[in-house]
Amino acid sequence: DTGVSQNPRHKITKRGQNVTFRCDPISEHNRLYWYRQTLGQGPEFLTYFQNEAQLEKSRLLSDRFSAERPKGSFSTLEIQRTEQGDSAMYLCATQGSAYGYTFGSGTRLTVV
Amino acid sequence: AQSVAQPEDQVNVAEGNPLTVKCTYSVSGNPYLFWYVQYPNRGLQFLLKYITGDNLVKGSYGFEAEFNKSQTSFHLKKPSALVSDSALYFCAVSPPFSGGYNKLIFGAGTRLAVHP
């Protein structure tokens, strides 16, 4: 599979627990983006990396959120002390050329 | 602030009829504009983009979009709708002056329902 892979596809967690999502980009795509999509809304930008450097973070990314991209390959997005408002689809996209974005299928988080 | 508006939550059209999904944007400078489609529990699939040049852009699955600078619009069109076109459609803009390497700003989406 040469697409963007996201795991897990679905995650149900209890409020207050920590969760971590993983995104495996298309090989050699040096830009990687995280978005959050809530029901009835379009995806909202969270953060992006160029290689291993995190270059921009949205104000949506509270202190409970952290993202990493060690060695410029896969990326992880961690949410600490989850809240019900964190329930959403988390999308990863990678970019290997100008204007060329490829999205993964997303991780759907449900906080109960 | 840069933003994208999709004024219709849902568009209903009969199979075989032409369809239009509307999008307007607010961006300083020359925008880069995109349309994506999303099927249930799936990621976003690219349909087409406008970077520069001809105002009529042709994309995947028979879709096209017309860039209108004076009206700041980028409406998605298809001459003959298929039931399989039923999905959620998103218009997006990439901030200019970035050479195409930047985040996307999305509209809220329009649900297209094509009836047999």
Image (spheres, helix red, strand yellow):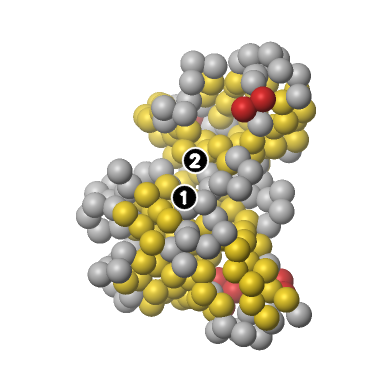
Front one among B87 and A3: B87
Question: Distance from label 2 to label 1 (Cα)?
Answer: 7 Å
Q: Where residue A98 sits in the image (x, y, percent)? A: 38, 53
Q: Where residue A55 sits in the image (x, y, percent)? A: 37, 29
In this rendering, the answer to whether B86 lies above or below A93 is below
Res. A14 image quadrant: top right
Q: Where residue B59 sits in the image (x, y, percent)? A: 50, 72
Label 1 Cα crowd, 10 Å radius (few <14 / some 14-19 / many 20+): many
Side of A64 where A109 appears, left or right:
right
Res. A87 image quadrant: top right
Label 1 sits on residue: B106
Q: Where residue A19 sits in the image (x, y, percent)? A: 67, 21
Side of A92 where A17 appears, left or right:
right
Q: Amino acid at mark 1?
A: Phe
* Residue at the (49%, 16%) spot, across then down: A63
Q: Contact, CB < 8 Å: mark 2 with mark 1?
A: yes
Label 2 sits on residue: A44
Q: Amino acid at mark 2?
A: Glu
Q: Chain of mark 2?
A: A
* Residue at the (56%, 77%) spot, across then down: B19
Instruction: Tell me the element at label 2.
Output: strand
